[in-house]
């Protein structure tokens, strides 16, 4: 089965102090066909600078990746048991 990822557009940029910013991505992992939430999906974001961030979706398929350093591009990977892996690049 295929995974769909709906980002509840949570690209949040928060000031952490002078000249420092942090970003966050939040969303919900769902089954593409039924729209059913996928709990315990493993999410990984790799930035163009080589930083890696990870999270696991909760029982409602929701996740939050926080503390990201805003980079020019990232790769998001999602894996869940019994589903085809999902990958997407963002710039």
Image (spheres, grey):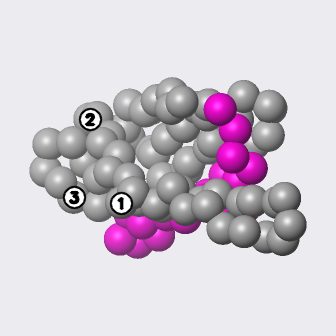
**Mark 2 neighbour class, 10 Å CA radius: few under 14, some 14 to 19, many 20 or more:** few
Numbered circle sitting on residue 8: 1
Above or below — where is 78 with respect to 28? above
Q: How many marks?
A: 3
The residue under label 3 is 36
Above or below — where is 21 with respect to 44? below
The tag earlier along the polypeptide, 3 or 1, is: 1
- Residue 39 occupies which quadrant of the picture? bottom left
Q: CA distance from mark 2 to mark 3?
A: 12 Å
The answer to whether the residues at label 2 and label 1 have Cβ atoms under 8 Å apart is no
**Mark 3 neighbour class, 10 Å CA radius: few under 14, some 14 to 19, many 20 or more:** some
**Residue lying farthest to the right in this orientation:** 18
Is 88 on the left-hand or right-hand side of 2?
Answer: right
User: What residue is drawn where x is 72% and y is 68%?
Assistant: 15
- Please name whichever residue, 87 or 40, is drawn nearer the observer in this view of the structure: 87
The tag earlier along the polypeptide, 2 or 1, is: 2
User: What residue is drawn where x is 28% and y is 34%?
Assistant: 2
Query: Is 59 inside the magenta-drawn segment?
Result: yes
């Amino acid at each position: 089965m295929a995974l769909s990822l709906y980002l509840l557009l949570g690209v949040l940029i928060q000031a952490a102090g002078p000249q420092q910013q942090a970003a966050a991505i939040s969303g919900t992992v769902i089954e593409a066909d039924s729209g059913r939430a996928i709990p315990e999906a493993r999410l990984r974001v790799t930035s163009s600078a080589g930083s890696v961030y990870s999270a696991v979706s909760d029982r409602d398929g929701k996740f939050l990746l926080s503390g990201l350093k805003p980079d020019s591009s990232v790769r998001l990977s999602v894996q869940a048991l019994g589903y085809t892996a999902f990958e997407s690049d963002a710039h």
